[in-house]
Image (cartoon, rainbow, N blue to C red):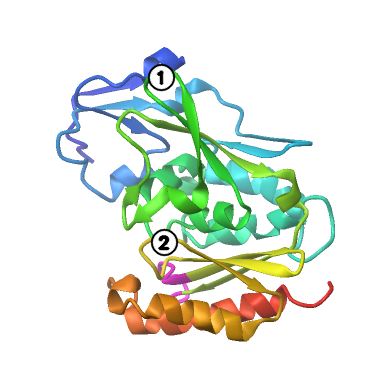
């Protein structure tokens, strides 16, 4: 494929991350094979040369590098979680495999596509947002002036294809707090066809007597709903609040109409709330 660019350079130090006119950052790069290069981009800066450790876990929680591939995420942190619902210090990670599989990607793409790339694209069906928002994660962002800042993953995507990243900023890593790693999580997904693009996705986490549910894919930007355990009436009220904005509140493309996405989201959210209820 002709990417219609002039240069590609590999970043190996933070100084290399200073963008020159016309340059943009490159994560795994798999998205470039499905869409044209953005207008005005004449060069790419490959972040995979930075040599960041894909992931690590310690007493403070889990850290996932922006360049961690989806394959590394599943075989690393994802393997720590075990089956969903099974008690353990990392049972919150039991939904990692399902969130990656929701992208309906090939093994070749999984070996190349990165966590940071999926987040930075800001696509409604980008399931890394639902995964890390459910785990109460924050994104660590390098700023062009040599500093850094943090933004909650649930606030990172602001609309379809729109993210809270300014020009020259790098999504360095995602941090999941230790408390979330040990909490119960749930996953639900719907699409028009068995292997179709995700049209509605709900991820959730049990937090004491509450449940945090994250709605993605069916909405332009994530919605985080905090409701009491087994409080299905409160959940309906929260979803009605979204529906009150009309069809524009729900994402629409060839993979699902707003009305269908809204109905599926409601069903999936109630299923996730039911799963996370009780005392298991």
Q: In the rendered view, does 247 fall on the left or right side of 14? A: left
Q: Which of these two is toward me, 19 or 163?
A: 163
Secondary structure character of the magenta stretch overall: loop
Kindly identify the residue that appears in the image at 77 percent across and 51 percent down: 90
The answer, for residue 174, to whether it is visible in the render is: yes
Q: CA distance from mark 2 to mark 1?
A: 29 Å
Q: In the rendered view, does 36 fall on the left or right side of 192? A: left
Do the residues under discs 2 and 1 have CB atoms within 8 angstroms?
no
Give the extent of the magenta segment.
191-200
Which residue position is annotated with label 2?
125
Instruction: Give the crowd class for mark 2: few <14, some 14-19, many >=20 residues within 10 Å.
Output: many
Q: In the rendered view, does 58 fall on the left or right side of 252? A: right
- Residue 100 drawn above or below residue 119: below
- Residue 197: which numbered mark, if any? none
Coordinates of residue 114 in the picture (x, y in percent): 48, 41
Coordinates of residue 204 in the picture (x, y in percent): 62, 66
Which residue position is annotated with label 1?
11
């Amino acid at each position: 494929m002709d990417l219609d660019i002039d240069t590609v350079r590999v970043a190996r130090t933070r100084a290399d991350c200073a963008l020159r006119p016309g340059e943009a950052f490159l994560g795994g790069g798999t998205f470039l094979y499905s869409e044209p290069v953005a207008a005005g981009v004449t060069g790419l800066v490959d972040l995979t040369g930075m040599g960041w450790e894909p992931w690590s876990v310690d007493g403070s929680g889990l850290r996932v590098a922006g360049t961690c591939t989806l394959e590394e995420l599943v075989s690393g942190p994802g393997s720590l979680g075990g089956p969903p619902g099974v008690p353990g210090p990392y049972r919150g990670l039991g939904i990692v495999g399902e969130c990656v599989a929701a992208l309906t990607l090939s093994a070749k793409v999984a070996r190349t596509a990165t966590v940071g790339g999926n987040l930075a694209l800001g696509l409604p069906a980008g399931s890394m947002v639902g995964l890390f928002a459910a785990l109460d994660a924050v994104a660590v962002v390098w700023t062009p002036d040599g500093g850094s800042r943090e933004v909650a993953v649930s606030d990172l995507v602001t609309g379809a294809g729109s993210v809270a990243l300014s020009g020259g900023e790098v999504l360095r890593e995602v941090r999941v707090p230790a408390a979330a790693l040990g909490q119960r999580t749930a996953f639900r997904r719907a699409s028009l066809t068995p292997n179709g693009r995700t049209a509605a996705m709900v991820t959730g986490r049990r937090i004491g007597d509450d449940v945090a549910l994250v709605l993605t894919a069916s909405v332009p930007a994530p919605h985080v709903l905090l409701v009491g355990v087994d409080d299905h009436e409160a959940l309906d009220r929260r979803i009605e609040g979204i529906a009150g904005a009309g069809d524009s509140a729900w994402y629409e493309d060839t993979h699902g109409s707003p009305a269908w996405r809204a109905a599926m989201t409601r069903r999936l959210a109630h299923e996730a709330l039911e799963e996370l209820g009780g005392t298991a």
